Image (cartoon, rainbow, N blue to C red):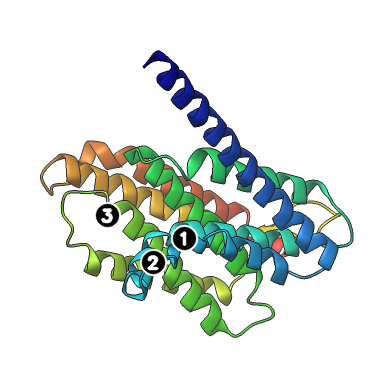
Amino acid sequence: MADYILLRKGRNKLSSFLHVALNIALAVATTASIVISGSYVFGLALVLLSKWRVIAVRPRYWWTNIKGNLVDYIVGIDIAMLIFMAGTDNINFWHILLTIIYAVWLVIIKPRSEPIMTEVQSLFAVFFGTFATALWPTQVNPIFAVLNCFIIGYGASRHVLIQGDDHDYNLTTFICGLMMAELGWLFFHWTIVYRLGTDTTLAIPQLPIVASTLFFFFARGYKSAIRHDGKIRAKDIIAPAIFSVSVIAVMLLFFSVASFDI
């Protein structure tokens, strides 16, 4: 019996090691394929192929699995797009940083299921999803930005709401999607970015900052309602509200001059 337990522990350790190693390899391979090929196609293909288990079931479960993994799709696809937008001439600092962030997502953040971590996962999806979306509209139709932001808002809010006891979250997730789409439409016509250096075309737009702070406020309010039988207590949301309003106000009032315009 003791030998069996030791063998089982050894297998669990090996399995955990292989899981970490494969996820790190995925992050590195995604970046390498984009930089070497000069295209985002191979990077996106690797991200999608890594989710093969989503469709490794009967077709009637595909849509449910896709919705359940939407946050992971958003983070993986949009980080791959950001790696591409950081340039493909050679490996630079932003490629390395985004690769590390993606590896941390895969190894540490995504596997966790605690309430606080589901909120962090959703914030990752909102930030990186709107980050990549805001940098693409200079080349695409505004409908792309609006639809993509709707999906981000829907997926991120669903990821948080599905953790609660009340499973009637369809209307709320739809409204969150619409609100995010409205932000996407607004910032499509008013895109202000903050440059990250002279060695890359990458820049942080205002949209992911605004969207993330508003989503943080929404998540705090939802958690308060869950704890208090559907009633949001002022003391639970005052600090998040002040933080969110302050960040957005400072950014819009003092860091939206023409020199930052894309």
Residue underneath mark 1: 53
Q: Quadrant of residue 157?
A: bottom left
Query: Which residue is pictured at 66% across the width and 60% down the height?
Result: 80
In the picture as drawn, the residue positioned furthest to the left comes out as: 229
Decide if residue 59 is on the left or right side of residue 260.
left
Q: Are marks 1 and 2 in contact (CB under 8 Å)?
A: yes
- Which secondary structure, mark 1? helix
- Which secondary structure, mark 3? loop
Query: Which residue is pictured at 71% across the width and 45% down the height?
Result: 97
In the picture as drawn, the residue positioned furthest to the top comes out as: 2
> Mark 3 or mark 2, which has the lower sequence index?
2
Q: Nearer the viewer, residue 112 or 56?
A: 56
In the image, residue 22 sits, relative to residue 152, either above or below, namely: above
Residue underneath mark 3: 162
Q: Are marks 3 and 2 in contact (CB under 8 Å)?
A: no
Residue 125: image location, x then y, percent: 49, 56
Q: Nearer the viewer, residue 129 or 253?
A: 129
Residue 48: image location, x then y, percent: 57, 65
Q: How many marks on residues?
A: 3
Within 10 Å of the Cα at label 1, are there few (<14), some (14-19), or many (20+) other Cα atoms? few
Residue underneath mark 2: 57
Q: Tell me the amino acid under the disc marked 3.
A: Ile
Residue 11: image location, x then y, percent: 51, 30
